[in-house]
Image (cartoon, helix red, strand yellow):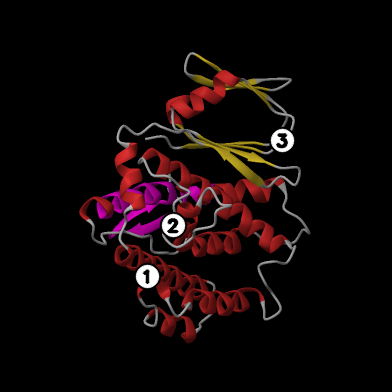
Amino acid sequence: MAFRNVYVQNDVHIRIKNEQLMIETKYDEFTIPLEDINSICIESLRTNISSYALQKFVEHDIILYICDEKHLPTGFLIGSNNYSRQLKNLNMQFNMSKPLMKRIWQDIIKIKVRNQSECLKELGIKDIKLDNMVSKITSGDTKNVEAKAASQYFKDLFGKDFNRDLDCIQNGALNYGYAIIRGMIARTLVMYGFEPAIGIFHHSQLNNFNLADDFIECFRPIVDLYVLQTLDFESEELTPMMKRKIYNVINCLVLIDGKKFNVQGAIDYMIKSFSTSMNENKNLIKLPYLIPIEEYRYA
């Protein structure tokens, strides 16, 4: 299984030679076996990449994140048509029953609010309101408990005047982490033959990743806790060191189906369970539970 997540901050040239990723600087050259690479994040706008390298990234299911002039992930490269029975899965997505969609969405929101509550507890903040909200989440979350919980949650985290639209370092850090996880989920959906644009709850015609935005919901509190426990927010904007730390959220451990996985492993487990749910037409979804921050260490 691929385990390396490569962060490229400086202006370099990237190419492929003998199934090795070659990163060339003015003074040195680094090589990494392609089979070891899970993802690559390129922050510099002056990095050069060969078209052959891009093709190899797709072939090896390596997700490539591209950052904008503000050094925030703005897009990612993922492969397509890598699944042998993609038409079957597309038909299942289009024909997915409303009751199944509502049950899965209910579970996603239950885990999201539960994880938000656990995040607060890990930070020494107790809010009985969130705990009580979990039992009120109905099939399809028709009472919109998610929005009510989110409003209370972010006030608990950052104060009553905070909102997610503010242009501040806290939101910048959270958005950076969310973008990394979103891309990882989209890549995994494609690997399992699903169309990320066809969502369960999200249905925007302007969004090519509705389904990824459905599944990211239960991972958001994991990003929140990691960011708040890892960064100090002493500067006014995200520094390269802060972004490298946030990128490492992929290696945080979570609990899913009673087992510990890092985030990227949990995403794979979750999407595999979604595939099983679709095939058997019943809710067998497995979702991640937030646990105290612990990073997976590779031997």
Residue at 32%, 44% in the rendered image: 89
Residue at 71%, 45% in the rendered image: 71
Circle 1 is placed at which residue position? Answer: 106
The kind of residue on which mark 3 rests is Ser
Q: What stretch is highlighted in magenta?
A: 248-277
The kind of residue on which mark 2 rests is Phe
Residue at 35%, 41% in the rendered image: 192
Label 1 crowd bin: few (<14), some (14–19), many (20+), radius 10 Å: many
Which residue ends up furthest to the top in the rendered image?
18
Question: Can you give x and y, in whole percent of width and height, for residue 293 in the image?
Answer: 47, 60
Q: Is residue 186 visible?
A: yes
In the displayed structure, 141 sits above or below 32; it is below
Sequence-first disc among 3 and 2: 3
In the displayed structure, 159 sits above or below 98; it is below
In the shown orientation, is residue 225 left or right of residue 199? right
| Marks 3/1: CA–CA distance | 40 Å
Is residue 276 one of those drawn in magenta? Answer: yes
Quarter containing the C terminus: top left
